[in-house]
Image (cartoon, helix red, strand yellow):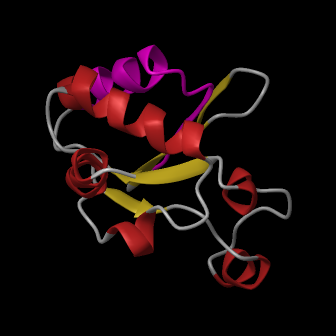
Amino acid sequence: MDMWKAALIVLSLAVPVSTATSGLEPVTAQRLILAEAYYGAPIFVTSAYRTQEHNKEVGGVPNSQHLFGKAVDIRMPNSATQLNKLIWALSQAGFTGVGVYNNHLHADTRNNPVFWRD
């Protein structure tokens, strides 16, 4: 990976590359960078790839997309307008699973499109 791409990943994820992108499918990481371009502001990832053990610790579902490197959890924006813009940006970038929770957004690249609210 060249320095330009690495810099974009660090900017996009707002956490160290080794922490946030380790285990992510390349297409998921690329879509995250694209989503940030559509969004026009940094997207802060709070969770990405998870091991089986970590997934159990955080209460993840047994077949979570995080286990396959296809999902990220994102810090909730400060306003409804920004939330709508972020959901739109994720959709435009090719994320097919989007879930809205009280304190974060989940986005993944599953095969069948789905949207949910907790």
From the viewer's perspective, tell me whether residue 16 is left or right of residue 74. left
Give the x, y percent position of residue 47. Answer: 48, 64
Residue 107 showing in the rendered view: no
Q: Which residues are magenta?
A: 83-101
Which residue occupies 35% across, 28% down? Answer: 34
Residue 112 painted magenta: no
In the depicted view, which residue is nearer to us: 95 or 106?
Answer: 95
**What residue appears at the point 85 percent right and 57 percent down from the top-left corner?**
63
Does 17 appear above or below 38? below
Q: Residue furthest front?
A: 2
Q: Please provide percent x and percent y for residue 93.
A: 44, 21
Point out residue 90 in the picture as x, y percentages from the top left corner.
Answer: 42, 26
Quarter-wise, where is residue 33 in the image?
top left
Residue 89 seen in this snapshot: yes
Asked whether, in this view, residue 7 is left or right of residue 46, the answer is left
What is the x, y in percent for residue 59?
Answer: 68, 73
Q: Is residue 78 left or right of residue 55?
A: left
Frontmost residue, 39 versus 12: 12
Q: Residue at x 78, y 77 (%)?
A: 52
| Residue 94 on the magenta span | yes
Front one among 40 and 23: 23
Residue at 72 percent across and 51 percent down: it is 65
